[in-house]
Image: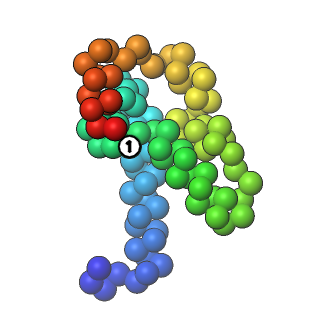
């Protein structure tokens, strides 16, 4: 990474992740199944990773708390407001990739 120190590289990565999380919070029109079909990860995956690494650092953080961090609101609220029923095409694509 050129002249970037390890500490600054970590800070840059943290800012990139913060930007991604904010972007996904704003793009409520993009469904998790679409993210999974295109990229192989979604907001729930980010939540699981967040929980995993927080726990590795000995923070007692559960999956629902991590979801609230990623979604910006409780997952149940996000689901009620923004999640749509998956189409047959979305489900077929998702199942093909498994």
Position above or below: 3 against 38: below
Quadrant in the picture for the C terminus = top left
Return the residue at label 1.
41
Horizontally, residue 47 falls left or right of residue 56, namely left
Of the pair 6 and 54, the residue shown nearer to us:
54
Residue drawn at 45 percent across, 19 percent down: 83
Residue displayed at 43% across by 81% down: 6
Q: Is residue 22 visible?
A: no
| Front one among 19 and 30 | 30
Residue 26, compared with residue 2, is above or below; it is above
| Image quadrant where residue 24 sits | top left
Q: Quadrant of the N terminus?
A: bottom left
Looking at the image, the residue that sits furthest to the right is 60
Left or right: where does residue 79 sit relative to residue 98?
right
Q: Quadrant of residue 26?
A: top left
Q: Is residue 27 visible from the viewing direction of this image?
A: yes
Question: Residue 40 placed where, x, y %?
Answer: 33, 43
Label 1 Cα neighbours within 10 Å, binned few <14 / some 14-19 / many ≥20 = some
The picture places residue 48, in percent across and down from the top left corner, at 55, 47
- Measured as percent of width and height from the top left, residue 92 is found at 28, 23
The residue drawn where x is 46% and y is 69% is: 11
The colouring scheme, among rainbow, by chain, secondary structure or one colour, is rainbow
Count the marks: how many? 1
Identified at 65% across, 37% down, the residue is: 64
SS under mark 1: loop
Residue 10 sits in which quadrant? bottom left
Left of 73 or right of it: where is 96?
Answer: left
């Amino acid at each position: 990474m050129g002249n970037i120190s390890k500490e600054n590289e970590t800070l840059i990565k943290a800012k990139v992740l913060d930007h991604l999380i904010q972007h996904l919070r704003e793009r409520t029109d993009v469904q998790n199944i679409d993210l999974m079909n295109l990229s192989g990860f979604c907001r729930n995956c980010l939540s699981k990773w967040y929980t995993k690494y927080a726990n590795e650092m000995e923070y007692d953080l559960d999956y629902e708390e991590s979801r609230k961090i990623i979604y910006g609101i409780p997952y149940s609220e996000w689901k009620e407001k923004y999640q749509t029923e998956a189409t047959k095409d979305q489900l077929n694509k998702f199942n093909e990739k498994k």
